[in-house]
Image (cartoon, rainbow, N blue to C red):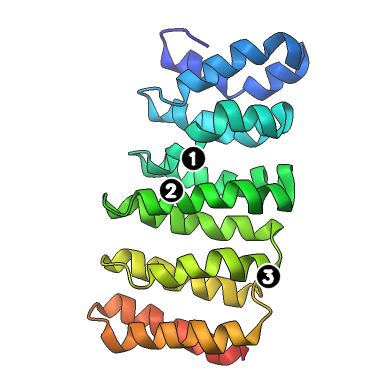
Amino acid sequence: MKDEHHTVRLNMVSQAATICGVLGLDTMVGSVLGTVQSLIMDNQWRIRLAVIQQMPKLAQLFGPELFQQKLEGLFLSSLNDSVYSVREAVIANIQPISEVFGSQWTEEHLLPKIVEQYQQVQGQGYSGRLTTLQALPRLTFVMSAEQVEQHIMPVLVKATKDPVPNVRFAACECLIWMLESHKLENPMMVTQSLEPTVKDVLSNEQDADVKYIAQKALDVCIKVT
């Protein structure tokens, strides 16, 4: 996996989990972990992408403890990768990793880390906040409605007040998805929190695209209550 030709490294890392499965975890864990930790920061973005795509299989092989110690930080830091395709792959693979480790692990461990990522990029470029917002719905597939309402919705409500229009737009999109996917079961959450939030966006918004998506969000709020 340390071959100087990136095509060879790419082919090898794409089979990292399979190699571990065939040769045995005890035999390969040290070398594979070290290689994965190195290649997730490779200069070639396709190699970083291939590593990210292997993460659910590696998580299943290594278990939560090793994953948290050796891979989780690098995986989540890739939410801020300079290449969109890599960031998109992190978002896509958050769901299968949360499914591997389950609801309790997701709520108690992964979700706080992603919310922390959102807080950490407040003073930086908006792409990090945007990517983090897009990652949050992926966690809901293993979370109860109560968990979603308690932990995720406050982040989305806060994001509707972000100084960057693209982030406000994404927050409204996420709210729509949550409502249409029936992730919320408490009607009071909609009527007392989400609906007033969206109305506030509409009354203060100057950006036409954000106004459009906020109106759509309001329509969905009214429809589901």
Residue 98: image location, x then y, percent: 66, 47
The residue under the point 70% across, 22% down is: 18
Which corner quadrant holds the C terminus?
Answer: bottom right
Q: Amino acid at mark 1?
A: Leu
Q: Secondary structure at mark 1?
A: helix
In the image: residue 216, left or right of residue 169: right
**What separation in Å lies between label 2 and label 3 (alpha carbons)?**
22 Å
- Tell which circle, 2 or 1, labels the residue nearer the N-terminal end: 1
Q: Secondary structure at mark 2?
A: helix
Mark 3 secondary-structure assignment: helix
Quarter residue 31 falls in: top right
Q: Which residue is mark 2?
A: 117
Q: Nearer the viewer, residue 70 or 39?
A: 70
User: Looking at this view, is 188 or 91 the one in front?
Assistant: 188
Q: Residue at x 64, y 50 (%)?
A: 108
Using the image as rendered, state which of residue 55 and residue 156 is in the foreground: 156
Identify the residue at image location x=61%, y=46%.
109
* Residue 86 to residue 186: above or below: above
Q: Is residue 153 above or below residue 127?
A: below
Disc marking residue 146: 3
- Residue at x 53% of width, y 21% of height: 36
Crowding at mark 1 (Cα within 10 Å: few <14, some 14-19, many 20+): many
Q: Amino acid at mark 2?
A: Gln
Mark seen at residue 76: 1
Task: In the rendered view, tell whether residue 132 sits above or below residue 218.
Answer: above
Residue 115 at what x, y percent from top left? 48, 54
Asked if labels 1 and 3 touch by Cβ distance under 8 angstroms, the answer is: no
- Dots 2 and 1: beta carbons under 8 Å? yes
Q: Position of residue 224 (x, y in %)?
A: 61, 88
